[in-house]
Amino acid sequence: MTDKALGSRIAIVGAPLDLGAGRRGVDMGPSAIRVAQLNARLAALGYQVEDLGNVGVEQQESRHYGDARARYLREITRTCQRLAAVVERALRGGAVPLVLGGDHSLAIGSVAGVSRHYRKSKQKIGIIWVDAHPDMNTPESSPSGNVHGMPLACCIGHGPRSLTHLYSYAPKAPPRNVVLVGIRTVDQLEQQHVRESGVTAFTMRDIDERGMQAVMSDAMRIAGDGTAGFHVSFDMDSVDPREAPGVGTPVRGGITYREAHLAMEMAGDSRRMLSMELVEVNPVLDEANRTAELAVELALSAMGKRIL
């Protein structure tokens, strides 16, 4: 059964970005998701699907990483600028952007594009960030200098100015409308950032104790309070690695298969989801494209596919 959650058009855009990650291979994530028949399966739900291709990304081998505290910062900034522009154009044209990653640093671009679109009509956006990690490091706190550990901090105005101030303003979403779901590993210095930031964090313990239904209900209420709606940023490492082995930073004890689907079904049912991204699919580490297949299934659930 299908209940189209968002409208009739979806714009798919790939961001084969691997400059923010410590392990190679996520640049092939958009291709793996497309190979799993994303476009055709969305069309089968009744959507008009437009694939906008991939935004440009520089190759690691052709660049020096620059500042070790924020590796490949200039190159990541350029990719995020390109992605933000494509996402904003898609929204302006009446389509729902669905971004395929690529490492999670690309979210700085997709969130910027969504935020700017709604800012033009004096509206704010919320963010639901489903992830094993908070992604709230800064160059000063990061143990690795990998920017894929910093994007949520950048979205709420903390981090390198070239990323926080895409389109010349920050934050892209008010921290009080930003919700983390499913976190279970936090760097030592990052813990303080999360506590003091104003975002709401639901850990795996919260999901264990309260259940995904209660957690997502609260997450959507918080992200949607006084906003045009919310952007969903789904890192595939939020799912337990037994179900999603093809990620660069797997952490045991994650969201189950059914919990992940329930979360996305609820996001779709709310009719408040403005845009979505699926990130950190790494085919090099996957088993027979299982993780990309799951990413497609979760996108379908978010876009209205139902059991009955």
Image (cartoon, helix red, strand yellow):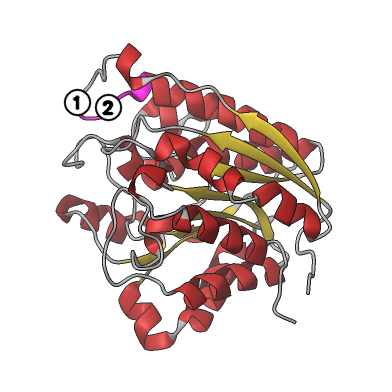
Q: Is residue 69 magenta?
A: yes
- In the picture, residue 83 is in which quadrant? top right
Residue for point 35% across, 58% down: 245
Q: Is residue 157 visible?
A: no
Q: Amino acid at mark 2?
A: Arg
Quadrant of the drawing holding the C terminus: bottom right
Crowd rating for badge 1 (residues with CA inside 10 Å; few <14, some 14–19, many 20+): few
Q: Are marks 1 and 2 in contact (CB under 8 Å)?
A: yes
- Say whether residue 244 is visible: yes
User: Residue 279 — which label?
Assistant: none
Distance from the alpha carbon under mark 1 to that under mark 2: 5 Å
The magenta span reads: 68-74
Q: Choose between 114 and 79: the one closer to the eye.
A: 79
What residue is at 53 percent from the left and 22 percent from the top? 56
In the image, what residue type sits under mark 1?
Ala
Q: Main secondary structure of the magenta part?
A: loop
Instruction: Look at the picture and state if 270 lies above or below 9.
Output: below
Label 1: state its secondary structure.
loop
Which residue is under mark 2? 71
Above or below: residue 212 compared with residue 278: below
Q: Mark 1 sits on what residue?
A: 68
Residue sticking out furthest to the bottom: 209
Kind of element beneath mark 2: loop
